[in-house]
Image: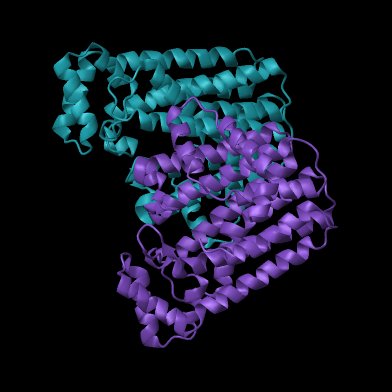
Chain colours: A purple, B cyan
Amino acid sequence: MEKVLKFVEEDLKRLEESIEKLVTTRVGFIKEIVNYIIKAGGKRIRPILVILCSKMCGYKGEKYITYAAIVEFIHTATLLHDDVVDNAKTRRGTSTANTIWGNEASVLVGDFLYAKSFELMGEEDNLEIVKVMARTTKLLSEGEILELVKTSDITTKEEEYFEIIGNKTAILFSAACEIGSILGKADPDTRGFLKDFGYNLGMAFQLTDDILDYTSYDEVFGKKIGTDLKEGKVTLPLIHAIGQATEKEKKLIERLLNKGNITAKEFSKAFDLISKYGGIEYTSEKARIFTEKAKTSIMQFPPSPYREALLSIPEHILSRRA
Amino acid sequence: MEKVLKFVEEDLKRLEESIEKLVTTRVGFIKEIVNYIIKAGGKRIRPILVILCSKMCGYKGEKYITYAAIVEFIHTATLLHDDVVDNAKTRRGTSTANTIWGNEASVLVGDFLYAKSFELMGEEDNLEIVKVMARTTKLLSEGEILELVKTSDITTKEEEYFEIIGNKTAILFSAACEIGSILGKADPDTRGFLKDFGYNLGMAFQLTDDILDYTSYDEVFGKKIGTDLKEGKVTLPLIHAIGQATEKEKKLIERLLNKGNITAKEFSKAFDLISKYGGIEYTSEKARIFTEKAKTSIMQFPPSPYREALLSIPEHILSRRA
C-alpha cells in the first residue's frame, strides 16, 4: 500500500486542498465539525479508487480531484450518521463528532455534506454521475436500515448479511470506481469491470473489518474491540458460529447481543464460540474469494502503472491489521 | 383555501397515488415509516405550489406530479431529522416517528428519502432541477444548523432569525415554485417572480408558525403550546421582547430557554413579556409584509385561474389558526 500511496502522493495532496476548499459554508460551526471528522484520518481509499480508475481509463482532465473529494464527503456523511445510529463514542481512537458536539449536530452536518456533494455534482454538469451517486446513497441508507432492523437478530442469514454489507459498504467502493470509468468515457464493458472490481473490493474490505472487530486489539485500551457484539451487529463470524451452535450457545449469543455493555469475560465467551466453529477462518476465506474476484476484474485491463496500483489494493485490504 | 384545494383536487389525488408508488424499496420497514409520516397529514402546500406554478407557466406534461411528490419527500426528510434534533415527541397531534421507531430509524429513513428524491430527479433527466434542489437541501441543512447554534441564545439578532427561517423554511417554498417555472420553461424574469413569491410566502408561513407556537392551543395546533420556548428556539416574538426587556426580564427569558421542561406558569411569564412589548403584533406585521411581497410577485402574471389560486394562498397563511 505504501507504493500505491507514493504513486498517488501528489493527487492526495491536491485532494486535501480540494476538501478544504470545497467545504464552503457561511456557518463556521459546520466547517469546524467537517474539518474535525475529515481530518481525523481515514485511509482515503475511496478517493484513491476514483483517482486510479479515472487515470487507468485515460482521463486527462482535472475533475477527478473534485469527484474524489465528493466521494469522501459522502463517506464522511455516512460516518456522522452511523455514529449517531450506533451511539458510538470513539472512532479510530478519537472521540466521535456526536460525543463532542451532540447527535443533533452530527445529523445536520451529515445532511449538509450529502447536500453539498450533490450541489458540487450539479455544478460539474454530469448527470450520469449524479445518477450513480443518487442510487448509491439510496442503497447506502437501505443497507444501514436493513442492518438496524437486523440488530441482535440471531436468525440473520448469511445472504442478509451480504446484502447489508453490499449496500452499506461495497456500493460506495463500486461507485468510486464507476465515477472513474465515467470520467474516462469508458465503454460499458470496461465500466462493468470497474464497478465489479469496486464492489468485490468493498465486500472484502467489510469482511476484513468484521474480522478485525473480533481479533484486533485497541492500542489505546489494550483490549479486544468487540464493538459489533456490543452494538448488536450480527456479522459473518458470528452468523457462521450461530449456524452450528447448540441451543444453549445460541441463547448465550443472543443475550450478549442484547446486553449492550458486555464485559471482557463475556466477549471472550463469544469469541471462544466463534473460534470453536471456525467463524474467523470462514469469514477470511470469503474475503479472500472477493479479493480474487476483484483482481480478476482488474486483470481485464492492459498493463499500466494504474493497473498495478489497483491490483495491489485487494491484497493490502486482506492483510490489514487495523 | 378550500377553493384552492377544490381546484387541485384531482392533482392531489394523483399526488397521493404517486407518493405511494414512488416509495419503492426492498426494505418493508422504510415503507412503514414513510407511510406513517407522509400520511400523518400535512397540508401538501409545497406540492400544491409545484402544481399551480407549473400550470400557470403553461406546462402541459405529466412530470409535475413526480416533482410535487419529490418536494414532499424532501420536506418529510427534514421533518424526520428535525424531530430527532428537537427531540420532539409529537407532531400535528400524533407521535413522531422517532418516538415510535427511535432516532436511529428516523435518521436513516430521512437519509433514504433525500437519496430517493435525488434518484427520482436523476431519472427525470433535468439537471437544472437537480441543481436547484441540491442547493436547496444544502441551505435547509445550513438553516437547521444555524438554528441549533443559536439555541437558547438571547443575543440572537432579528437578521439572524430571518436568515434561519429563510433557509429552513422559505427556501423550499421557493424551490417548489421555481421547479414549476422550470417545467413551464419560463423566462428568467418569470422564474425570478416565482422564486420570490415562494420565498416570501415561506417567510410568512414560518412567521405565522412562530406566532401560533405562542398563541394557539393544543387541540387546534396539534402540538403543545410553547414548544419553541421549551426547545430553546429564539423566535421573533421573543427577540422583539428581548430587545426592549430589562436586565431582570432578560435573565428570566434566558433561564426559561435553558430550562427545557417549563411549567404552564413559566410559559405564561414569557408570554406576558412578549405581550408587554408587543412581540406578537410586531411579528404579525412582518408576516403581513411578506404576504404583500408575495402577492406583488404573483400580480406580475396575467389573470388566470392558477394566478387566482396562488394569490389566495398568502391570505390563507396569514389567517391560519393551526
Task: Please name the residue shown 70% across and 30% down the image.
Answer: B183
Residue A316 lies in quadrant: bottom right
Q: Position of residue B314 (x, y in %)?
A: 48, 21
Task: Please name the residue shown 55% across and 66% down the image.
Answer: A208
Q: Position of residue A193 (x, y in %)?
A: 78, 59
The correct choice, above or below, for B156 with respect to A108 in the image is above
Q: Position of residue B228 (x, y in %)?
A: 30, 32
Task: Please name the residue shown 56% across and 48% down the image.
Answer: A75
Q: Residue furthest bottom?
A: A246
Residue A173 lies in quadrant: bottom right
Q: Residue A56 versus residue A114: which sits nearer the camera? A: A56
Residue A17 lies in quadrant: top right
Q: Is residue A11 left or right of residue A249?
A: right
Q: Is residue B92 visible?
A: no
Task: Please name the residue shown 33% across and 24% down the image.
Answer: B235
The correct choice, above or below, for B168 with respect to A158 in the image is above
Q: Residue A185 versus residue B242: which sits nearer the camera? A: A185
Q: Position of residue B112 (x, y in %)?
A: 54, 50
The correct choice, above or below, for B75 with respect to B180 in the image is below
Q: Is residue A122 visible?
A: yes
Q: Is residue B269 left or right of residue A33?
A: left
> Which quarter shows the C terminus of chain B?
top left
